[in-house]
Image: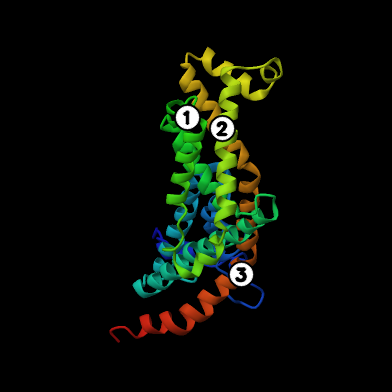
Amino acid sequence: MITTITPRNTSFCADNKTINGDGEYRDPLMRWPLRGAAFTNEVGEALRPIIGEYATLSWVPALMYIGADVYDKYKNNNTEYSPNSKRCLKQAIFQGMASIFLPLVAVKAGQKVFSQFGKLSDDKITINSKEHIARIAQEFIANGKMHAFDGKDEECVKDFLDRVSNNMDFKHRKKLFRIFHIDKKENITRYAENTIKDLIKLRKELLNPTNKIKTGNWYSYFVKSLKNDQTENVAIKSVLSKFQKHKMIKGKFIKTIGGFAALGIAIKPIDNFVENVLIGKYVGPGIDNFKK
């Protein structure tokens, strides 16, 4: 009896899921919802204002998907096993532009645009500027400056404002994004001054609490920190840092919405532009003609 060995490439034959009614190939890796795996990193970046460094984990499924797709295009020509490095290079460029670079630009642009909503508040400065001041405040707290200026409120305010002034220079930013950072200096100074004064006030309330303060959440967190064997100074730092982060929650949500909005609007136009224009008219023909 003769045993027939089925060639390995038959495993790539089309079925009713990859061939439509007209006999045209439909790439399962490029169809939704599987195509959405390429954008998990953009979703993570849109959420970065809220989840912080955990957003980096969202790159793992995206890169795994992109790697699988690029390898598939190298190995297969639609449903036929036919390794081709040029086809692989085209798909790598497509995924790099359509799934990583341009969507990421869209997310960041959406966040910057929505940052402008901060100007609608009484503070009249962008959310990005508020976040920048908040980061300076976090460093100020972490470096023990609040403790160093204990009882010297005016000196504390002046030192903090000097730090903000030295760090809020947007003159050297790229012209393309400079429009997103235009805030009046007096508005920035006023917001920064209110920020440090709020921190000084809270610190005093924690050290000399009234009965009303003792019923509040910040004092409860302070007491809890002390019970966890933190020193008074470290416990105060923890509370002030948490207080500063809490102030930025609303702004972070607004920027996240902006990132998602831009991503949702841009995904399909980006795919079409990269496939039909960038790859179809320019990069693809160049690769095909290389070393012919």
Q: Residue at position x 60%, y 40% from top?
A: 194
Which x, y percent locates residue 288? 37, 83
Q: In terms of sequence position, does the residue under pointer 2 or pointer 1 come before the other?
A: 1
Q: Kindly report the distance in space between the C-alpha atoms of the residues bearing marks 2 and 3.
A: 46 Å
Q: Kindly report the distance in space between the C-alpha atoms of the residues bearing marks 2 and 1.
A: 8 Å
**Residue 212 to residue 116: above or below:** above
Position of 73 compared to 253: left or right?
Answer: left
Q: Residue at position x 63%, y 19% from top?
A: 220
Colour scheme: rainbow
- The disc label shown at residue 289, or none: none
* Picture quadrant of residue 35: bottom right
Q: In terms of sequence position, does the residue under pointer 2 or pointer 3 come before the other?
A: 2
Residue hosting label 1: 146
Q: Amino acid at mark 3?
A: Lys
Q: Nearer the viewer, residue 112 or 199?
A: 199
Q: Kindly report the distance in space between the C-alpha atoms of the residues bearing marks 1 and 3.
A: 50 Å
Which x, y percent locates residue 136? 47, 42
Which x, y percent locates residue 109? 56, 63
**Residue 257 to residue 74: above or below:** above
Q: Amino acid at mark 1?
A: Met
- The disc label shown at residue 268, or none: 3
Are the residues at dot 1 and dot 3 in contact (C-beta closer than 8 Å)? Answer: no
Position of 182 compared to 214: left or right?
Answer: left
Residue hosting label 2: 199
Query: For the residue labelled by badge 3, is the local secondary structure a helix, a strand or a loop?
Result: helix
Q: Residue at position x 59%, y 64% from top?
A: 31
Q: Nearer the viewer, residue 277 or 139?
A: 139
Whether residue 204 appears in this view of the structure is yes
